[in-house]
Amino acid sequence: MSGVKLDGKPINRFKVAELRDLLQVRGLDTSGLKAVLVARLSEALEKEAEVVAAEGGAVAEEPAEASCGEKRKAEAESEEAKPAKASKADADAEGAAAAEKAKVEAEAAEAAAKAKAEADAAEAEAAAKA
């Protein structure tokens, strides 16, 4: 159905619960059948990649692991600063959601960099033929 991949796995191979988690992280509707969830997530991932590409791929210039690691460190510090009222389960869920979001952003940046490289290669090939 969708050629969009996340962690090297086509998103239509994710379980419904995983799809809902990925949609919830993005603040999107989590209701519907699997096909609807896949379509909604696919559209969101494509838009994220377009945004990164439109920003000139600036995020993609950094190594994905470093960018992701920095975000996780900031999120961990943010978690420590929260009031003690939040339960451990709430903190774990928020941390997992934030980590997933950071990972998806890094993947979107990587996809945008790849698309830019392919476009640059095609442009260079066209210029060489001319």
Image (cartoon, grey):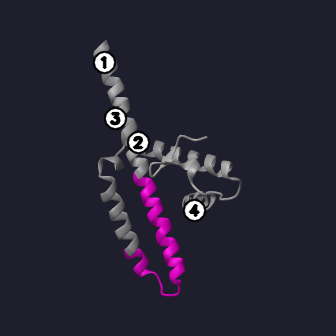
Foreground tag (3 vs 4): 4
Whether residue 3 is in magenta: the answer is no
State the residue position of label 4. 21
Quadrant location of the C terminus in the rendered image: top left
What number is the disc on residue 127? 1
Q: Can you say whether 59 is above or below 93 in the image?
A: above
State the residue position of label 2. 112
* Secondary element type, mark 1: helix
What number is the disc on residue 117? 3
What amino acid type is highlighted by mark number 2?
Ala
Location of residue 78 by image quarter? bottom left
Answer whether labels 3 and 4 touch (C-beta < 8 Å). Answer: no
Measured as percent of width and height from the top left, residue 105 is found at 43, 54
* Secondary element type, mark 3: helix
Q: Distance between the residues labelled 3 and 4?
A: 31 Å
What amino acid type is highlighted by mark number 3?
Ala
Q: Which residues lie in the magenta part?
A: 77-106
Label 4 neighbourhood size at 10 Å, few (<14), some (14-19), many (20+)?
Answer: some
Q: Distance between the residues labelled 2 and 4?
A: 23 Å
| Label located before the other in sequence (3 or 1) | 3
Answer whether labels 2 and 3 touch (C-beta < 8 Å). Answer: no
Label 1 neighbourhood size at 10 Å, few (<14), some (14-19), many (20+)?
Answer: few
